[in-house]
Amino acid sequence: MQNKGLVKFFAILFALVSIYQLSFTFVASKVKDDAKAFAGNNPDKEIKYLDSIGKEKVFLDFFTYNEVKDKQINKGLDLEGGINVILQISVKDVLKGLANNSKNPVFNQALDDATRNRQGNQSYLDAFFEAFDNASKGTTKLASPDIFANRNLSDVINFNMTDDQVKKVIVKKVDESVESAFGVLRKRIDKFGVTQPNIAKLGQTGRILVELPGAKDVDRIKKLLQSTAQLEFWETYNAQDYVGFLTTANEALKATVKNDVAQKATPNDSISKLLTDDKDSTATKKGKNPIFDKFVAQGGGPILAIVNTKDTAAINGYLKRPEILAMVPADKRYTKFVWGKPNVVTDEKTKKETETVELYALKGNRDNMAPMSGGVIVDARDTFDQMGKPAVSMKMNGAGSKTWEELTGRAFTQKSNIAIVLDNIVYSAPGVSTGPIAGGNSEISGNFEIAETKDLANVLRAGKLPAAAEIVQSEVVGPSLGQQAIDAGTTSSIVGLLLVSLWMLVYYGKSGWYANIALLVNLLFLFGILASLGAVLTLPGIAGIVLTMGTAVDANIIIYERAKEELRHGKSLEEAVKTSYGWKGAMRSIVDANVTHILTGAILFIFGTGPIQGFATTLLIGIATSLFTSIFIARIFLDRAVAKGVNITFVTNMSKNWLTNFHFDFIGVKKWTYLFSSTVVVVSLVSIFFVNGLDEGVDFVGGRTFQIKFEKPVDPTVVSEELSAVFGSAEAKIFGDSDQLKITTKYKIKDAGVGVDKEVNEKLYSVLKKYYGANMTYDNFINIYEGKRVGVLQGSKVSASISDDIKTNSYWAVLGAMLVVGLYLVISFRKWQYSLGAIAAVFHDVVFVLGVYSLCYKFMPFHMEMDQHFIAAILTVIGYSMNDTVIVFDRIREFLAGQVKGSFKEVVNASINSTMSRTINTSLTMILVLGIMFIFGGDSIRGFIFAMLVGIVVGTYSSLFIATPVLVDGMKAKDIEEIESRHAGKA
């Protein structure tokens, strides 16, 4: 090997740099352990301790803790625990805002059509443009005065612009809105108080990823992230102003609404008293009044009535009916009916909790615009009101102060109230008793917890989002589950490393030691690069590292097997080593095999998200470091042994006769293998499309998934039935132990808003709380915390929109991998038949794995879902199947160009038989590490690993019995005659 000194220099330098980079991770870990010990496992105290030492030097008297923390390998959500969400900024709302809430029918039809007809991973904006073109058919322009050529956009859009010109402006404006939302969310999470929060825009999709490692309060965080912070100040009507309307509406509804189950009217109901003095009259009889029967307490002042939260949907439905709206007095026709902040009341006798809300009537206007918005707020602080209760004080700018003085002055004169409305919820509606309020100071008070006022002040300071933010994907992982994942990953890594190392020693002897040293150096380089890139380590990422241990020795195996052949042909050890490391030896096979790996890994990185990208990252880095260490590090030791005269045979006394002298007629049995594989493919396709289908996870169909641990084993069938009665449909399956279930439901998955997520959580708790002791509260059941052992350990949500994108990306990823690798083989081997054989084998492998999952998912003791992890497994299978195929094809190409005599089929058979040791060894090392991960890797990735295990076994079979026969059958008769004429007389 030339430039051996230069290789040694770079290897040592690279090792030192890797150790240096990894040292930050070790130091940060030690500081965290110290913080945990100091805090006594109190998360809040731990965070405060780490914040307090953020600027203290903790490493080499040079780096502060904050600097060390930024340079460490961060643990992903599945290892650290915490909350991860993907927010979709509503482009529909942005467009409405840009169009000044246009009433143009073509514009609004296009918005609705875009929502309904958006395909796959098509952006909403592209879908809107397409829908607008279809709806307008050239009759309406985007630059119409009542669409985008309005006062708000007059500086960038004029009436004479074409639709294409306007589209460019709108794309820019939407991007600005997403950027604005990104900035607002960053301000919010920076103040939330979690260690190492992460926020990132996901390309041009309008989606924003927010990761909060160590966060605990699920409902609070979702509310914080989704709140648009749309603060408004409205004047209110008084309850007596609406007695007549409510009475008329109630009478009109009697004829059309049947109150099968009415709520009990309270004796002191002021509304009822105003309506009649006869308690037994028809007007007040329980079950006869659609509206009044749902009023559970008296109103007064700005409050029309108090209603149970569960009845608000019914009241909303009544008040939105056209015939009821027509009864609103003419001077109140722009009224906005709005609910207040929920309030939980506990009955002192029964101790039963009831959640109620107050109904308000706001003085609206033609434009449905508040007299004053929250844009005037320049500062907000959490404080306490005069009664000592938590509140939020606000400071306004000059213009806001003037408007606030006018508004409060009018309220004082009219003896009315001013409702402070945040995101369409009335938080308080104070009266004005001392005259106009000057100075621009105001306060939001109400039934607050201290944490709520802190969050509210936080979002008001950060500013409002430009549009609604919907959580389209979320994942919640408890710390204890993360620790289990770390333990499982560590165990599988250590055992896998030991087994691979032991196999290399048993099979290759002294040269196996060199391969093992190269493997250890490879792992050092791999972790060093991950640390220098600031990569996030996830459980699939650990799987990628373990797989790297299998691939790391592949190149050594190919080289060693070639060296054994050269020794058998009578060459000296020095000549054998030199030849095996040459391009005509093992290098060509190694390059071709690893290029196919890199291509599939790159496609996996491009189309994957989150943990899957982590898997792809470690896989790609592992391929690069494995090539370097296998080719250069192991070579240094081999050359040194040769120079010292050490006798290296690349075998041991035990393995010297293993996997040698194969003389199997692979081409001769192709009819039987074709028949077997065709049967498997047909059975698989029939099962997939007509019988069992596939167990599509929420990644592909949308839905919510919860991993729940119970105090003792439960019957999943019973739990499924109980949950289905509440959610409409729900599925519960045993996940690992019999006291742990994985529950999936699609309940309200298309509905947006933090309220929906909380509703699902509350319903889940209400059904399952009977399986726990009396101390299991809602917060303990839903939220995550250190040491949690029962309740919701992990929860995830995937909306229908993002599941469509995932499914589309998955299809393109699999097809793209097959096509790109096929194209590379055409270029490398210069005959399309090689590519055809490889693609036929890969197609066979993919269908085989899909068939196994379709046939077995109903009775296997572990989950076999189609999700992103499964697609990652399929792409990995494609890469390894190509690897085996390339090794065989490379030997066929070598033999066809060499001195092997015989017919075309005989030469091909000889090629396959001569590579059996390489093929079986490379596959066996992969099966070893995958088997270890399947056993020790944990329930969450067992299905993922099983797919790769099946794929590697089937891929080895297809390389020998499918790819090569298809190559042979695809060769032209003319080419076969030419090959046989060259080989017929060769010795």
Image (tube, grey):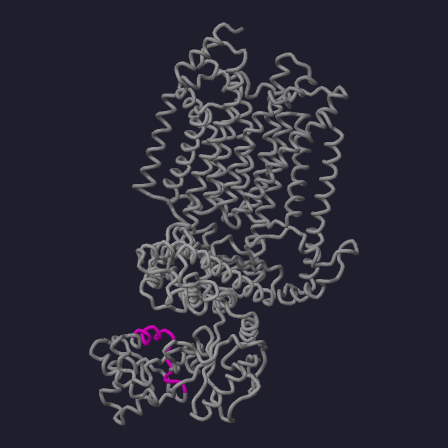
Is residue 714 visible from the viewing direction of this image? no
Task: Kindly identify the residue that appears in the image at 41 percent across and 86 percent down.
Answer: 302
State the residue lying farthest toward the right. 61
Give coordinates of residue 500: x percent, y percent.
60, 34
Is 421 located above or below residue 569 in the figure?
below
Residue 363 location, quadrant: bottom left
Give coordinates of residue 336: x percent, y percent.
37, 79
Give coordinates of residue 350: x percent, y percent.
41, 80
Closest to the observer, 22 or 508 = 22
Q: Is residue 303 magenta?
A: yes
Is 956 located above or below residue 108 in the figure?
above
State the residue lying farthest toward the left. 255
Q: Is residue 243 left or right of residue 517?
A: left
Q: Is residue 270 magenta?
A: no
Is residue 340 visible from the viewing direction of this image? yes
Closest to the observer, 198 or 439 = 439
Q: Which residues are magenta?
A: 302-317
Q: Is residue 924 left or right of residue 905?
A: right
